[in-house]
Image: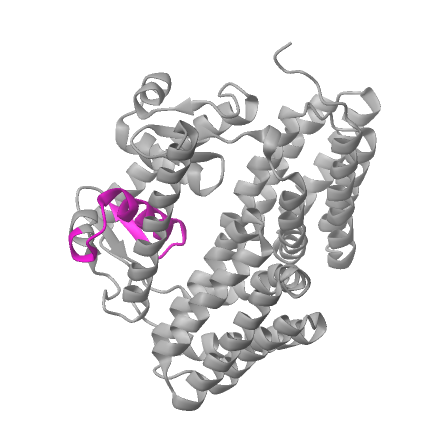
Amino acid sequence: MSGHEMKTGSVLVARSLADEAYNIIEVLLIRGEIPEGSMISEVSLSKSLNIGRTPVREALQRLVRERMVTPVPRQGFRVNTVDIDQFLDGLEIRREIECVLFSMITHKACRWQRRLLFHMSERMARAADTADINLALETDRQFKQIQIEISDNPFLTMAVRPFHAISRRVYFAEARTPVRKLATSIAEIMRHSARGDIEAALSANDSVINALIRFGTQSRARHAGKGGNGNAAEDASANKVQRLSSIAYTRIEDRIIAGHYRGGEELNERRLCEDLEFGRTPVREALQHLAARSLTTILPRRGVRVVDFEGLDFSGLIEALRPLERMLARLVCRNASPAFRRFLVRTNALLYSARNRGHPDTAILLDRRLEKLLVKEADQMYLQDAIVPLHSLLRGYLNHRQVIMSSDMIIILSEVLDAIASGKEHEARLKVEQLLSEIVYMVRTTPVRDRHR
């Protein structure tokens, strides 16, 4: 076996163990065997699960990103209370993403995968008939896994996973037995996907989302009046650590996007601590975060490897961004304050000025600032979790390819802002689609330059 194969094999083993640890811990949280508000630790979980600390640490970091647990300095991780309002807000975004996801599944599944989907539909129907919540839980988990396998798009997977996580937790934590209509609709999605009937699969998925909305609304009444997730001192300490890791993350991300850390380059904690003048804890957390967002790959006992933008699946990235950008435009149209709408009008004037004066760099800086402000104004944390890492990957890819913001791109971006400022949801959704198409055109028509020349 070559050295490269050995390295790749060790990464795959570590990844599979981290997935196994995540699946076990998630089930314990869903079933309430680890109750809300309780503290868990990497060491105790590693011992009880008989899995090494590194994969358990990765699993816990993923649970942090999915907002299921919160790190508490020197104590471990606190299990969060379910946020029903955020769950309900996220369901429409999940519906948008799954329109793309199920379209891919119905077209791309092979015969073996279609047979598996049929078997899953039968198991889910049986779970509904026999009121077997454990069978429903396991079948749902397997269905999510095969969705990821068939779609073969890591960016779409990264975007949809948090929505699946919160949905599974709310549903299976609240339901003592499978909700018959919901379980039946999930079984129908599996069956229609296996048959390749996209319209029927999407119709069944609409039934699932609508049922989850009704279920979540009923659950909200039961959660009314619940306290916070912890005490103020713990939260203040946790927030301080998270601020430091967030700063470390931003600085490393900026260096990756700018090309200071080259694609494929290996980084270790010691070097990064020296470069950033940070301690190991925030740097380690930042690296876990970067790996989760596909900007790096974790190398067991060595550090991380920077994403190779040259080999990035650009088409897959755009495919994952489309439903998220449509939903972002919709939410900002609905939620933007009058002051923010006036700000967009002023910014539009600056964009036109940059275009007329031939200053694409100014437009790029405005675009980066707008990106963050639009996500903030949408006021949906799960959308933010899904779209921000994809924005980072896109910026890094465009910078690597040295794609310059064209006059047409500036015009369409200006039209997006005008539609949002005016609250025109339909037009805003169409314009963000056009903007992504313009980016694709610019990438295809921009000559690849030798960055090392």
Helix, strand or loop: magenta stretch: helix
Q: How many marks?
A: 0
Using the rendered image of the protein, determine whether residue 85 is visible from the camera's viewpoint: no
Using the image, determine if residue 181 lies above or below residue 226: below
| Residue that lies at the very extreme toward the top in this rendered image | 453
Using the image, determine if residue 433 lies above or below residue 194: above
Q: Residue 377's spot in the image, x, y percent?
A: 57, 48
Residue 124 vs residue 321, the one in the foreground: 124
Residue at screen point 48% across, 56% down? 161
Q: Residue 310's spot in the image, x, y percent?
A: 61, 28
Where on the picture, by quarter, is residue 189? bottom right
Q: Which residues are magenta?
A: 47-72
Using the image, determine if residue 176 lies above or below residue 145: below
Residue at screen point 81% across, 36% down? 411
The quarter of the rendered structure image containing the N terminus is top left
Using the image, determine if residue 318 lies above or below residue 34: above
